[in-house]
Amino acid sequence: MTSKVQLYIYDISMGIAAQLSPLFLGKKIDGIWHTGVVVYGREYYYGGMGGIEWCHPGGLILGQPLKIMDMGETHIPLDTFEEFLRGQRERFSPDCYNLLDHNCNNFSNEVVQFLTGKPIPEYIIELPREALSSPMGKQIIPFLQVLDPSVNESSVAKKFGQPKPTSAAQVEQPTPKTALPAGTEPVLQDPVLLPLDFDLRLSLVMTALKEIAGGLAVDQKLLQELSAAPSLQANPSAAISLAVSLSRSFSCMMEPPPAAEALAKYFVVFTSSTDLMLSLSKNTDDIAELVSKLTLCSIDAGMVDNKTSVLRLVGTALANCLYHESVRAVIADQYEQLIQSTANMYLLRSDPDIEISSALILNVSYLSELSEEQLEELVPALLEFIQPLLDNDSFSDQHALWCVTALLKFLRQSPEMLEVAKAMNVDLTKLKSRPSDLLRKSCTRYELIISD
């Protein structure tokens, strides 16, 4: 399956460069270019506010592009492309942005080369340096930074990984249930996909499944086919059929005892694939069954001492489920159990797994239209989870950012939860001493909110 790759080209000077460049620069230039790469129905770009972001094609504040350049087609799967972007986020972080040397055009060039093997036109890459490095050019950089959509977020821009707008109406962002003070909008962290551990290689997972196959009501042919496959994506129909079949009988109390862990490992591997989850979510009954069984199993496993490994695996699979926008869009009926599991089995445990709990609460925060009752369960649980970890070295900057992002997103929805946060008085000052700039900014915004 192929996807068309296009380069959207904008003039961030909006025609001013063409008119005034002879006067200011001594030569005419046609524009100061901003570019985005359109592929898989999204426009991806890089900027100084959010790093790697995306929006609906043509959805930036600049309006429609000045020019659309066809760059060819790509055979690279969406899963592989998203993995590539995750690998680039440190290099293309907000702090690394530079209008002259490390900008949206450099990002577009690397993306297009990854997808098609071809670079974007050299004049686009070199023009900002050529035009703005002169003495007069340097004087207009602050003006261009005001106009540049990659430095100033548009209202429809998304951090990489957020849900994709599916209609023109959804492109416009809804008014928050409560308006936060000016300047307190949270620095958003994308939903996260937890990495697979070494012992979750497909060959080991399939071996574990075959060992308990006699007690499973599944087509043994599926197990054989997938055991010979290099990845689940290599045989998607078999992978999906097996996931549906296993979810129907999944329970943390399965016999023999290793069965629940073997099935949970398969679900972790399966839910880490965007393509497989997208295909599965087309049948809302199947995806609802999977999320429901994972949620119920986590609640059961959390109440049994010797099921800790199953609880961790199921938590990983749940977090990975919620990473996928295709899943979040169709599981509203599972919210109650899912939130009960997140709060009680992961956040409020006496020995929580920090990474899994932090990833799960972040991805839960991307569920749409949470009710006041659901927020009443999540916000206190999250604050209680954070409080004892402030001096814990295992609570990394990344985990802390996930939690604070979730907290800010929840508080945006409810004035009542602002009062709860104020009453609980969890002081995030210690997190502001961490190296992460995004974490410091998020904690500062939290302090502004609860002090208002």
Image (cartoon, helix red, strand yellow):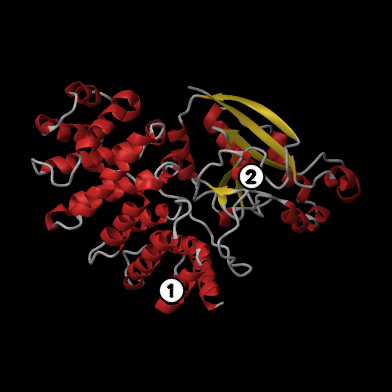
Query: Residue at left 45%, top 42%?
Result: 329
Marks 2 and 1, how far apart at CA: 41 Å
Residue position for label 2? 104
- Mark 2 packing: few (<14 Cα in 10 Å), some, or many (20+)? many
Residue toward you, 93 or 178? 178
Relative to 36, 382 lies left or right: left
Kind of residue at badge 2: Cys
Residue at image coords 89%, 47%: 20
Residue 399, by quadrant, is bottom left
Q: Count the numbered circles shown.
A: 2
- Tag 2's secondary structure? helix
188 or 409: which is nearer to us?
409
Q: Where is 33 relative to 234, above or below?
A: below
What is the quadrant of residue 80 in the picture?
top left
* Circle 1 SS class: helix
User: From the image, which quarter does the C terminus lie in?
Assistant: bottom right
Instruction: Give residue 238's position: percent from left, percent from top.
Output: 29, 24
Direction from residue 18 to residue 243 in the image, left or right: left
Residue 32 horizontal/vertical position (percent): 76, 44
335 shown above or below 255: below
Disc nearest the viewer among 2 and 1: 1
Q: Few, some or many C-alpha atoms within 10 Å of disc 1 (few <14, some 14-19, many ≥20)?
A: some
Q: Is the residue under label 1 in contact with that under label 2 (CB below 8 Å)?
A: no
The answer to which of 124 and 254 lies nearer the viewer is: 254
Say the numbered circle drawn on residue 179: none
Q: Position of residue 128 (x, y in %)?
A: 73, 45
Which numbered dot is residue 420? 1
Residue 95, position as x, y percentages in the image: 57, 57
Query: Disc 1 marks which amino acid?
Result: Val
Who's the residue at 29% across and 41% down the image?
268
Residue 108 appears in which quarter of the rendering? top right
Judge whether residue 254 can be spotted in this image.
Answer: yes
